[in-house]
Image (tube, grey):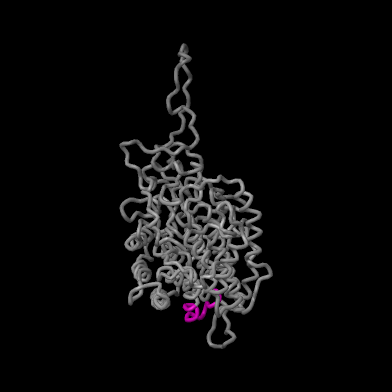
Amino acid sequence: MTTTTQTDGTHTGPSASVLTDRIRGSLYGLLIGDALGCPIEGWSPGKIQRRYGVLAMMEENMGWSPRPRGLHSDDGQQAIALCDAILEDPDAPAVGFARGLVELYTDGPKDRDMFGHHRGTGRNFRTTVLKLEEGAGVYGASQPSAGNGNAMLIAPAAWYWRDDLATLSARVIDISLVKQHSTCGVGSAAAVAFVTAHGLQEGGFDGLELTDLLEFVIDIETRVHERASDRGLVRGASPDRTFSSSLRRALSLFDRKRRQALAGIAKIANETADRRVFATSGYSVASVIASLYMTLTARSLFDGILDTVNLGGDADTTGAMVGSMVGAAFGFGAVPSEWLEDLVARGAFDDRVPPMVQRARGWRPARSLVELERAWTTKLIEPFAKERPKFKPRPLGLGFGPGSKFSLDPGFDTDTAEDEDEDPPARLGGSGPFASPLADFVFDEDEDKDNDDARPSAPAKQGPRRGVKAASAKPAPGGRSARAAKPTSAEPTRAGEPERVAKPERAAKPAGAAKAEKPEAAEKPEKPEKPEMPEAAAKPSASEAEPEPEADAQLSLFGD
């Protein structure tokens, strides 16, 4: 890799052209991961497989909260708001970041449950923005959330302070405290920033020392606790080490196959969560650590983003986090052109890359984020919002899967999670208190390869397996996601349903046969897909059983 001496003469690093490619790759990785995962937020791997086979291209989900094809959500919006704040004043980016969040709210529509130009936000985030608008001060609206709401947006800090870990550490704290003051929320953001910075500098993760990552997180936890204690936001003499201690244990799983690693991460997360979570849930101990695993085991940018999004759950946020990290390592040149063609924001934020490479100060874009988002709201969001129903499905813990009584469309989920940073009500499968989020995935145990040999499939009990390897090839040019083929003989359908059997050929009727003779049941034309519960004697699989409703008081870990 071409390197050059930096202007201060103190170290060497990638050349300007290489940094441009990597920062642009991180930018587009974040936006693509967000946009690709947005329509399936809250879905299980099995449901994704049943509808798409492998979700490999941008799709849309115009449920209660519209998810237009190729449009990023709040993950991308808040990352760009941070990017602009850093370039305007790198010494105090938190001020510009807080102002940008408020401007996106005040400039946009407030009717039909819209929160300005913000898309896909939750209660904690809305509370923060409303308090900021009322004059609470930059850090006066911070929430005690342990969600992934800071980890999803922190990449621009790594772009700017990519080779200065001391300043990066300080800025991660400054920026994160605008939204969260828990050590989990800020420590998880620090982990994503550290890995992104390493990818930018090294062009890969082979030389990344996991002990250095852990020490970086521990140091930030200590400093966050000190800052929060000074403001009376936390009690106790010692910091909460939930994230770093969980990360320390999870790192021992990073050399294992995907099924084992993610099941282990889910188990670790459930030990500190206040309700059942999965590896892709919004709790930072779950989804951020899982995203670190998916990043450090990715063989390419395409594999990393595609495999992560098809795990379901908080798919837009995990996609954005993994996309920002693998994009930093593999660069813009690794981004498939098919994804770029469908991305609504293609080219919209490219002008931010050169000033990031140059570490500009006092820089402002020709078109502000608010201007761009206003145009997308007007064109893509408001027309649908005016036509959507006046009621909203209950948002959490009630099972919004196909056929649920709370689903507006039995075959396609509405907005299943109130906040992508909250634990979505996805039934991710498995059994027992620490269910594997990959219960609907089949792994090639026969091949001596890494975890990426996973391919989506129906549960093993459903008969012969069917599926497409998630990382087998790039999407076909101009094509949409590979949708699941129409079931054929003995092919599995939805979990919990009997196998579909191909119609037998009708034998010729013997002479004199009665006209009133009824055909066999198997000869009846199949009705459109309709979810059915298994027979009473059969116990429903955990991937299809509705979770028990959770009380609102149980959501403290899962806000922005």
Residue at x 45%, y 17% (from the top left corner): 517
Q: Is residue 22 visible?
A: no
Q: Looking at this view, is 258 or 187 the one in front? A: 187
Q: Looking at this view, is 227 or 200 the one in front? A: 227
Which quadrant holds residue 87? bottom right
Figure check: 47 above or below 297: above
- The number of discs equals 0
Q: Which residues are magenta?
A: 159-170
Instruction: Report the predominant secondary structure element of the magenta stretch.
Output: helix
Looking at the image, which residue sits at the far bottom?
9
Q: Position of residue 259 (x, y in %)?
A: 38, 57
Residue at x 65%, y 62% (from the top left corner): 372
Q: Position of residue 257 (x, y in %)?
A: 38, 60
Residue 18 is left or right of residue 128, and the answer is right
Looking at the image, which residue sits at the far front?
134
Q: Position of residue 310 (x, y in %)?
A: 48, 54
Residue at x 47%, y 63% (from the top left corner): 560
Residue 314 colored in magenta in the image = no
Q: Is residue 389 visible?
A: yes
